[in-house]
Amino acid sequence: MDQSVPDPYKEAVTPVFWDAEDCPFPPCSTPDEIYNSIASALLEREFSDKVTVWAYLDDDKKGSWRDALLADKTWASRIYFLPAGDKASRRIRMANDILLWARESPCRPFQEYLL
């Protein structure tokens, strides 16, 4: 492969869609630490180091672990917390966001996507 031609996979943003209710963040980690861990793991697998994480939460739950994370909004990482409702609503919103991202993504073919 000619190295002078830009690789669209290296230049693209790698998205991570995370159901943070069914798979909560590790309690001893900050969003910045989680983001850096995800970015370095993807970079080791030769994905882009440009990562965006969408974390889907149940906006009806109060007093959960997420309240502690969301209380301090000074995180430098690109983790976006999205209210998505109950389990079925989160799955629908995530699927919709994945399809919208795939449609707008410059990267092809689709078999390269990991769900």
Image: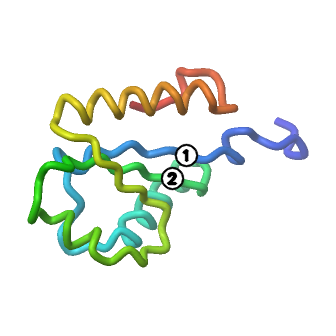
Secondary structure under the numbered disc 1 in the rendered image? strand
From this view, report whether residue 80 is shown above or below residue 99. below
Task: Name the foreground residue: 91 vs 42.
Answer: 91
From this view, report whether residue 63 is shown above or below residue 12. below
The residue labelled by disc 1 is 14
Secondary structure under the numbered disc 2 in the rendered image? strand
Name the residue located 85 percent from the left edge and 45 percent from the top edge. 3
Do the numbered discs 2 and 1 sit on residues whose CB atoms are within 8 Å? yes
Residue 109 rendering spot, x and y as whole percentages: 62, 21
Name the residue located 71 percent from the left edge and 47 percent from the top edge. 11
* Residue type pointed to by label 1: Thr
Q: Tell whether 22 sits left or right of 29.
A: left
Name the residue located 19 percent from the left edge and 47 percent from the top edge. 58
Mark 2 or mark 1: which is in front? Answer: 2
Q: Quadrant of the N terminus?
A: top right
- Residue lying furthest right in this view? 4
Residue 31 rendering spot, x and y as whole percentages: 35, 68
Please count the marks in the image: 2
Numbered badge on residue 72: none
- Label 2 Cα neighbours within 10 Å, binned few <14 / some 14-19 / many ≥20: some
Q: Quadrant of the C terminus?
A: top left
- Find residue 17 and report its image quarter: top left
From this view, report whether residue 115 is shown above or below residue 109. below
Residue 67 rendering spot, x and y as whole percentages: 19, 67
* Residue type pointed to by label 2: Thr
The residue labelled by disc 2 is 52
